[in-house]
Each structure stands twice: as structure tokens, then as C-alpha cells.
Image (cartoon, grey):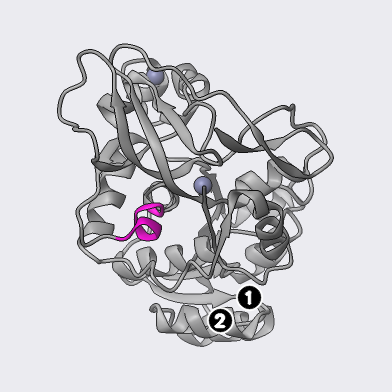
Amino acid sequence: MKAAVYRGGGRLVAEDWPIPAIGAGEILLRLKGCGLCGSDIAKIVDPATRGPAVLGHEVVGEVTALGAGVTGYALGDRVVAAHHVPCGSCHFCRRGSESMCAAFRTSHLDPGGFAEYVRVPAPNVLHATFRVPPHVGDEAASFVEPLGCCLRAVRRARVEPGDTAVVVGLGSIGCLFVQLLRRAGAAVVGCDPLADRAGLATKLGAAVAGPPDAARRAQHELTGGRGADLVVVTGGGAEVLPWAAGTLRDGGSIHYFAGGGGDALPLRLDALYHRELTITATYSSSPADLTDAFRLIVAGAIDVGRLFTHRVPLERLDSGVDLMRRREALKVYVTP
Ligand SMILES: [Zn+2]
Ligand SMILES: [Zn+2]
């Protein structure tokens, strides 16, 4: 089969890759498509990423083979399958840290979503595979994973009705946060220097959106000068933290949902302590979050239709990576 293979050097090359063989309890999917995630791009550009590797984890595909004992799925079913699945019973899982579970970190789709076929391991089939109803398109279905990650972040950040929340970075993830925070009852201020992204965020429910200065002024007016209850950082790296701390009310919290851009926290400990600020972080989701995300997408409760802006075939995945890196594409959907 064809796959886009990472072999270092910041590039992906279309190559032949063996079709995975499935065992008991497993499913083979023929990919309809796979979303290109910011975390894929972070791995592609990181010289420390080990190759050869097939990335991609926001998959939607059709069941083409069923292992012994698989029930509940039939050949031809269109499904979304999770990349990682926790064990559900270890200390981390019982404390809500499913993405820190050893099983979570070692389980994955084989080889990855940027391929024609993937093997879905048995625990993933059992706990986090969803049959997509006909009215939900392939691209919308591929948003179950990113939306699940954002849902988990919103839960961890403990937003309350009446809060004012600032979302930094209005890419596809930021636009999902805008909608989820709005649903949670917060007034949302979007922050992004790109005017078209700010415009989209207001269509999706942000009270105001604009570049950092405008976002800070808007937040100031909305809260009567008190400061935002929550700042969600979806991009920009560590240098955003002092800005976020200056935008927060005393006792407010920052939720960090972005890799890269500096490896230390440029935040005064004195401010953290005397202003009682809280910093939380999440990077992934649990099967429960994915289940909720799937329900929201099936119900049409979250607008994802405006978020995928580009489609590229596997052979030209590199061009999709460039579009996202230049911030020209909100979301790229990759088809085999
Ligand atoms: Zn993702
Ligand atoms: Zn576990």
C-alpha cells in the first residue's frame, strides 16, 4: 500500500509500506482520510523524531476486514478509531490521567493515518471506535479526536458559567475551544493576529476577537477591569505566558494546550503565589472524551464544517504541511 513516510529531514515521502496483518479482535480499515494535526507537524519538524514512521491519528475509514471475535461491526462500516487507548484500571486511569497510562502511550493505530490501510488494535476496537452515521461527512468525522482533546482541556480548566475566557491562537483547535467554552457558559475573547481567523471566531461564538492588544482591551471591558478567569493557550509557546498572566484576574487560570516555543515558564513565582494563579495542561483525550466529542459532532452541536480548508492527497502531504506552517490552512484533510 501507499503511505507518507517520515524518514527525517522535516519531510514526508510517499512510499510502499506493507499492509498490516490483523489478529483476533482487530479491524483493518481502508482509510477515507485523516486530519493533519499540529502535533504531526511538530513531530515532522523535530529532528529528534525517529523514522521511518507513518504519522496521522485523526482517522476515518471503512472496515475491510474483521479479526476473529469482533462483534458490533460489519464490512463496509464507516468508522472513526482512536489512536491511543488507556487500560482503564491503573492508578493513572482511575485518577483521570488516562493519557499518562503506560498502555495509552504504547497503543496506537498501525502504522498511522497517513496510509491507505490501518490496523485497529483490539483495545481500540473495544473502547474507542465509533460507527459514523450517513449524515456526518468524512471530514467532520475526522474531528472527533481533536474535539475530544479540547473537551478534556475544558474539563481540566474548570470553566464556569459567567466566566470570561480568552483563547490565544484561532487555528482549528482555537476555533473548537471558542465553541466549547461558549457552550460551557463563558464569554469568549479570541486572540489571533490574522484578521480572517478572528472573523471566523466571532462567527463561531466569540464575543470579540482580534490581535493581542484588541483582545486584552476587550477582556478588560467585558470584566470591568477584573481580568479574565481563564486563558487557553493553543499556540505561541512559552512567551505567551507573561501576556496571559497579565490578562488574568487574580486567582485565574491558564490552560496550556500547545507544544514547542521555549522550554521554561517565563512567569514570576511571586505572581503565581501571591496572585494564586493556576496553570493546567492537557495534550490528549480519553475514551470518555472521544465518546462525548463523537456525540457532539453527530448532533451537529459543534461547527466543524468551516474548519477544514484544504484537502491534499497522500503524495502531496508535504504541501499540506507547508500550508499549515505558513498558517494559510486552518485544517488540512489528507486522502489516500
Ligand atoms: Zn490531533
Ligand atoms: Zn491505565
Q: CA distance from mark 2 to mark 1?
A: 6 Å
Q: Residue 142 colored magenta?
A: yes
Q: Is residue 331 left or right of residue 240?
A: left
Question: Residue 321 appears at what percent x and percent y?
Answer: 69, 56
Q: Nearer the viewer, residue 294 or 208?
A: 294
Image position of 57 with respect to 223: above or below: above
In what element is the residue under mark 2?
Answer: helix
Circle 1 residues within 10 Å: few <14, some 14–19, many ≥20:
many
Q: Is residue 154 left or right of residue 265?
A: left
Q: Are marks 2 and 1 in contact (CB under 8 Å)?
A: yes
Question: Residue 188 appears at what percent x and percent y?
Answer: 44, 75
Q: Nearer the viewer, residue 170 or 14?
A: 14
Q: Amino acid at mark 2?
A: Ala
Residue for point 61% across, 33% down: 54
Q: Quadrant of residue 44?
A: top right
Residue for point 30% across, 67% down: 183
Q: Which residue is mark 2?
A: 198
Q: Is residue 195 visible?
A: yes
Residue for point 61% across, 52% down: 38
